[in-house]
Amino acid sequence: MEESKLIELARQGQTEAFRRLFELHREKIMSIAYSYLRNTQDAEDILQETFIKAYQALPSFQVKNRMNFSSWLTRISINCCLDLLRHYQARQRKETNWAQNQLTNSAGDLKGGNPESVGQLQTLKDKIENLLEKLPPKQRMVFILRHYQGFTIREIAEDMGVSEGTVKRMLFRAFGRIRKYLKNYLLENNYEMSSG
C-alpha cells in the first residue's frame, strides 16, 4: 500500500495504518536520534516521542511546501533531540559521545606521521568527540545530518525548517571550528593535515 494511502487511513484513526508508517520510518528516525544523542536508550525514547507527537498531530498534517511525511517526522525528531539536549545541559547530567568510529574513517586525511599506537588514535578521537560536544546544538545537528547521515543541503533545510543558505552557513562554521581544532592538535603533535 502506498504511503499516502497509509497516511490517509491513519488520519482517519486506523491504528494498523499508523503502525505500518511507524515500521516504514522507524529505522531512519532511530538512526538520526542515535547519531545526535549517541545513546541507545535516549534514541529509543526520542523514537517513541517522535511517533507519539506525530500520531497526536496527524489529523492536522498537510503536505505543504514540498514537505513530505518523512521530512515532517525528521523535523519532529530533531526538535525532540534538541529539547532533550537542552534538558541535559540545564541539569548537567549527561555528557554525549559524538565521534565514535569516525576518526578511523578519516585516517586517510592524515599524511606523514600517522598515529602509531592505538593510544594516540584514541586520544585524537577523544579530542574530536570533545569538540563536537562544544558545537552549538543546531550546528552539531546540521553537521551530523550532512556528514554522518548523508543528507543533502536541501533535505536538511526542509527537515529543519530553515533556508539552504542557513544550512550552508551552519556547516561552514561547524567545519571551520573542527578543522581549526584538528589542525592545531595535529601540528602540536607533529602530524600534518592534508589541505584537500
Image (cartoon, rainbow, N blue to C red):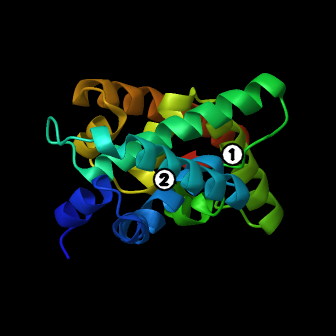
Q: Which residue is mark 2?
A: 51
Q: Vertical placement of 33 versus 78: above or below? A: below
Instruction: Locate residue 159 relative to residue 47 in the image: left or right.
Output: left
**Residue 24 found in image quarter:** bottom left
Secondary structure of residue under mark 2: helix
Q: Nearer the viewer, residue 194 or 102?
A: 102
Q: Is residue 42 above or below residue 175?
A: below
Give the side of residue 98 with respect to residue 23, left or right.
Answer: right
Task: State which mark lies toward you, 2 or 1.
Answer: 2
Tag 2–tag 1 contact (CB < 8 Å): no
Amino acid type at mark 1: Glu
Instruction: Say which residue label 1 marks.
Output: 129
Q: Residue at x 73, y 44 (%)?
A: 96
- Front residue (pair 130, 115): 130
Amino acid on which the number 2 mark rests in the picture: Phe
**Farthest left residue in view:** 65
